[in-house]
Amino acid sequence: MHSESRRHHRCALRERGPSRPCLLVVSSTERLFNIESESSPMQRHEKLIYGVLVRGIDVLPDTKCGHYASEKDIIAIKFPCCNTYYPCYECHEAVADHEAIVWPRQQFGEQAVLCGHCGSELTIQAYLDADSTCPHCQSAFNPGCKAHYPLYFAMD
């Protein structure tokens, strides 16, 4: 962490009151925000991944999160309700201040899936057709994510 970030970090901690949320700049690509419970083992994060902002809980550089962190959990999905990427639906539930909505079929041509290994943004249809493998870098995606498709995409 460079000295400017450390100064900002210390200053933010000193100015924090007991009832105010804390905003800490950790680095140029990561920011902790609105930590509601200091006893919680998970931290809310925003992280730039290949230049794309991804929000969630304990977000790692390859889009893994505090909820899903296997070697194959390397995608983030953009939610149409807020036009923001999250590693999973649980991260959206924990961090967003609104209910999630699913992508309608007529918008499956939209880029809404980020590969955490190579940074490629896939259309929803390309992701669904990819058979759990990034078509750009050939990295394996978690095939178990298929069980959650209805939480992200209109599958009827």
Image: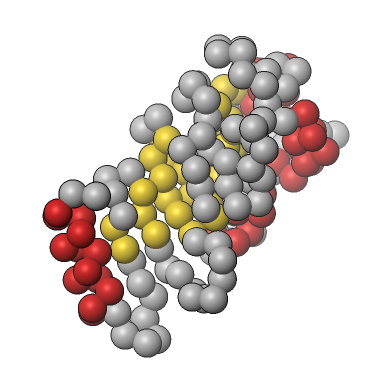
Q: Is residue 89 left or right of residue 60?
A: right
* Residue 120 image position (x, y, % from top left): 50, 21
- Residue drawn at point x = 55 percent, y = 62 percent: 42
- Tell which of 100 and 26 is nearer to you: 26
* Residue 72 image position (x, y, % from top left): 66, 30
Q: Can I make out residue 67 in this image?
A: yes
- Total label count? 0
Residue 38 vertical placement versus 116 (above, below): below
- Residue drawn at point x = 74 percent, y = 45 percent: 151
Residue 142 vertical placement versus 95 (above, below): above
- Tell which of 38 and 145 is nearer to you: 38
- Residue drawn at point x = 57 percent, y = 41 percent: 64
- Residue drawn at point x = 24 percent, y = 64 percent: 9
Residue 106 vertical placement versus 148 (above, below): above
Quarter where residue 87 is shown: top right
Q: Is residue 86 left or right of residue 30?
A: right
Q: Is residue 47 left or right of residue 140?
A: left
* Residue 100 image position (x, y, % from top left): 64, 53
Q: Can I make out residue 108 in this image?
A: no
